[in-house]
Image (cartoon, rainbow, N blue to C red):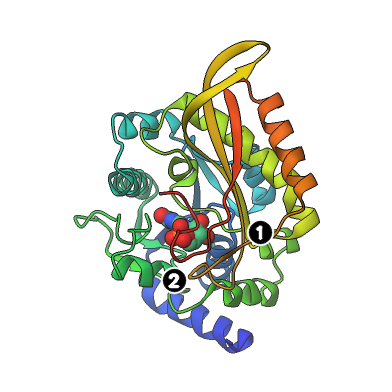
């Protein structure tokens, strides 16, 4: 377990050393990792930090508005890049290709914003499990293995690179961040793109966004899962309003975990599962079937891609 006060002091010093007199851009997603990074960097370098929220079009329901209001006072730059992301993802079906395309887009947007703002350094909230899983070849998390090699920054600063998620949450507490941020479920950098199997389209993302919102509403406050979400896993035959429907199959996943390296499915009451299935199929027109995933990690990963 990390000594929070010492970690904060050392991280602030390291960020100051690494940044020098340069301006630093960072991706602020509003998750605990990037929020902690931003708070550390704001302490370390003040106005030289330029936090940027990229609306990829792949975010959760209401997320952009939420981030805007949460970080209204820190000079947050909001970049609407959803058209660019959907275009970059056209025709891509392979999960690793998706991650690479998203990582590449992110970096290019950051290079662009860095040029515009005169920043030369990039700050990232990469944590220890991201590195392990990318180095181990399990999958390239978009903020590590997916990063293009011809990156134009003078340097990359990763103050959380040795921490596990629960340690990051402790640091968030030490920094006095709101409980909403400290306890937020993890959300993958590539966003909802890894929660639709195969090609990413606006239609699929709109459906999975609604399904994710319903799953969170049904489970977060009542069961406090480490992570829960919905994924679109394919098409199947169904019947809605007496008409046969080739509809989407939504998989619901809810897990307990310490650090995301291993995970166990949450044992949910049948009534809760049934309510979720009813809401998802009733509220989302194109969905005809809902299944609950009871596979631990390993062998399954938490996300579907
Ligand atoms: P997996 O699916 O690898 O997920 O069992 C472990 C944890 O990591 C999150 N995850 C990601 N986070 N970029 C991220 O920043 C990614 O590409 C990525 N893939 C998975 C996942 O949501 C879970 O919390």
From the viewer's perspective, tell me whether residue 71 is left or right of residue 23: right
- Residues packed near mark 2 inside 10 Å, few (<14), some (14 to 19) or many (20 plus): some
Secondary element under disc 1, as helix, strand or loop, is loop
Q: Is residue 161 above or below residue 51?
A: below
- Residues packed near mark 1 inside 10 Å, few (<14), some (14 to 19) or many (20 plus): some
**Quadrant, the N terminus:** bottom right
Q: In the rendered image, is residue 49 in sight?
A: no
The quadrant where residue 146 appears: bottom left
Numbered circle sitting on residue 246: none
Assess whether mark 2 and mark 1 are in contact (beta carbons under 8 angstroms).
Answer: no
Q: In this view, does 271 lie above or below 286?
A: below
Residue with the mark numbered 1: 184
Which residue is at 51% across, 85% downward? 10
Q: Is residue 109 above or below residue 26?
A: above
Which residue is at 33% across, 58% downward? 140
Q: In this view, does 265 lie above or below 80?
A: below
CA separation in Å, label 1 and label 2: 17 Å
In the image, 291 versus 57, the foreground residue is 291
Mark 1 and mark 2 lie on one chain; the one further toward the N terminus is 2
Q: Position of residue 286 (x, y in %)?
A: 57, 22
Mark 2 Cβ and ligand 1 under 8 Å apart: yes
Secondary element under disc 2, as helix, strand or loop, is helix
Total of numbered circles in the picture?
2
Mark 1 Cβ and ligand 1 under 8 Å apart: no
Which residue is at 74% across, 63% downward? 179
Residue with the mark numbered 2: 129
């Amino acid at each position: 377990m990390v000594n929070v006060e010492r970690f904060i002091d050392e991280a602030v010093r390291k960020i100051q050393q690494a940044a020098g007199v340069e301006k630093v851009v960072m991706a602020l997603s509003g998750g605990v990792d990037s929020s902690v990074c931003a708070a550390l960097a704001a302490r370390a370098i003040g106005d030289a930090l330029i936090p940027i929220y990229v609306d990829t079009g792949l975010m959760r329901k209401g997320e952009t508005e939420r981030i805007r209001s949460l970080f209204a006072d820190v000079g947050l730059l909001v970049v609407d890049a959803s058209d660019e992301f959907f275009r970059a993802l056209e025709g891509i079906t392979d999960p690793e290709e998706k991650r690479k395309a998203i990582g590449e887009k992110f970096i290019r947007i950051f290079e662009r914003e860095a040029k515009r703002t005169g920043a030369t350094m990039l700050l990232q909230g990469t944590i220890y499990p991201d590195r392990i899983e990318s180095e181990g070849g399990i999958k390239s998390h978009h903020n590590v293995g997916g990063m293009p090699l011809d990156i134009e920054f003078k340097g990359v600063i990763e103050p959380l690179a040795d921490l596990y998620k629960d340690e990051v949450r402790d640091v968030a507490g030490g920094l006095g961040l709101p409980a909403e941020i400290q306890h937020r479920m993890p959300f993958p950098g590539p966003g909802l793109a890894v929660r639709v199997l195969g090609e990413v389209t606006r239609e699929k993302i709109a459906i999975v966004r609604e399904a994710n919102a319903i799953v969170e509403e049904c489970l977060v406050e009542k069961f406090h899962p480490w992570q829960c979400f919905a994924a679109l896993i394919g098409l199947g035959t169904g019947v809605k309003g007496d008409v046969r429907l080739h509809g989407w199959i939504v998989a619901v996943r809810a897990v307990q975990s310490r650090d995301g390296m291993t995970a166990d499915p949450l044992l949910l009451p049948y009534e809760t599962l049934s309510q979720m299935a009813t809401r998802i199929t009733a509220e989302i027109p194109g969905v005809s079937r809902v299944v609950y995933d009871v596979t631990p990690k390993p062998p399954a990963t938490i996300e579907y891609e």
